[in-house]
Amino acid sequence: MRVKLTKGVVESARANQSGDRLLWDIVLPGFGLRVTRAGVKSYIVQYRAADGRDRRLTLGKEGAMTLEQARRLAAEKHLQVRAGRDPALEREAALAAPTVAELVARFMTEHAPRRSKSTQEHYKIFFRCYLLPALGGRKVRDVRWEDLDAIHRSLSSTPYAANRFLSACSKAWALAARWGWWPREMPNPAREHDRYPEMQRGQALDPGALGRLGKGLLAELPGSLQVAAFTFTLFTGCRPGEALAARWADLEGRCLHLPDSKTGPRTVYVGAAAADLLDGLERISDFVFPGRFGSLYDLRPLWLRLRVRAQLSPRLRLYDATRHTFNSTAARLGVPREIRMRLMGHAPSREVHDVYTHYAPEYLLRAADLVAKELAALTRGEQEGLRQWNVGPDYRR
């Protein structure tokens, strides 16, 4: 039926029990009102697309928009059709467009496994706790700079986490552009934000603090595997997670070959003091430091106790007391930076000099012996340093 659609006509329109009732406007061709059998009223627009097919598009429900708003929107759709566009197909594409939740799922499936386990855990926390609750149902294409900025500002009390959140989102939207889920010509919404200043992370224990730490370790239960794992981490400079995941099968002589670490497979060079510690352990499991369900899970509860006993700063982290202390001690003893990087398992430099330089295991073990012996002495309360690094003749291969 063709009528002049007015507010009165729309309000008085009644349902037709035989099917949808259509009232077409004589003022704007193609614009109309549909009344379903259940009495639901919606504004619609009908047009002929470039392929010759007639298409019908729902503009919105009556009440959610006024008659004049619907008429203006219908006129806009006709202009789009004249410009060669197809509003109905565009809406279908928009509805089928991936959501932020789908982006996160693909990111965690395809990209995250290439990163270290700790980085994967950080991704999970950032997305599950911050991004998905706020924007999970939003289309990837609809996310704007202001949306991510609001989340970033909400995390102002934790500057480090706030900035890492933006880094994770920046990578996610860069991949979205590569996958065709984000227009390449559009700027990445996670970039160009004002990052929060971060307090410098990382400290190292001085000889006096190491002596107090040694006394704190002695106060723990004799034969404690947590103490053994902590001491091994300190004496080797390996990451706590690497120490807890170590298996006896990975140990070859005084080299612990880890199939997986933050930087990929690597070798931990076990100094003599750390090797003596391992010799005193029973092999009751595949894991060097077994726990109730596989390996020990976490050294942080032990570290919190040690930090109080040794009267250390509350800001001092487990990483500071182990890896940072190991590296700083090695530097104080004169161990070259390149050797320290290999002992610590840091990603190798891309400089040609570093790529082409290879060190014999015996040379690296000599450095590991020196650092581990120094740390063992300091935790026993011996204040003066033992010796300085002495470069031997056949240190490269």
Image (cartoon, rainbow, N blue to C red):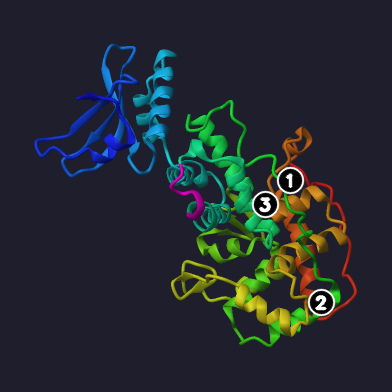
Q: In the rendered image, which residue does mark 2 sit on?
A: 209
Q: Which residue is mark 1?
A: 359
First in residue order: circle 2 vs circle 1? 2
Tell me if mark 2 has few (under 14), some (14-19) or many (20+) residues whose alpha carbon lies within 10 angstroms of its own.
Answer: some
Is residue 246 found inside the magenta-colored segment of the image?
Answer: no
- Residue 255 position within the rendered picture, expressed as x and y whole percent measured from the top left: 63, 57
Tell me where residue 384 sits by quadrant: bottom right
Q: Is residue 178 left or right of residue 240?
A: left
Seen in the picture, residue 94 relative to 273 is either above or below; the reply is: above
3 vs 1, front mark: 3
Q: Amino acid at mark 3?
A: Asn
Residue 26 spot, x, y in % from top left? 29, 20
Q: Residue furthest front?
A: 8
CB under 8 Å between callouts 2 and 1? no
Q: Which segment is the magenta one?
A: 133-138
Taking the image as drawn, is residue 272 in sight?
no
Left or right: residue 23 compared with residue 263: left
Residue 174 horizontal/vertical position (percent)? 57, 35
Query: Mark 3 or mark 1: which comes first in sequence?
Result: 3
Residues 342 and 392: in front is 342
The kind of residue tagged 2 is Ala
The quarter of the picture where the N terminus appears is top left
- Amino acid on which disc 1 is placed: Tyr
| Mark in the foreground, 2 or 1 | 2
Instruction: Compare marks 3 and 2 and give the one earlier in the sequence.
Output: 3
* Label 1 element class: loop
Q: Nearer the viewer, mark 3 or mark 2?
A: 3
Inter-mark Cα distance, 3 to 1: 37 Å
**Magenta residue check for 135:** yes
Q: Which mark is residue 163?
A: 3
Q: Secondary structure at mark 3?
A: helix
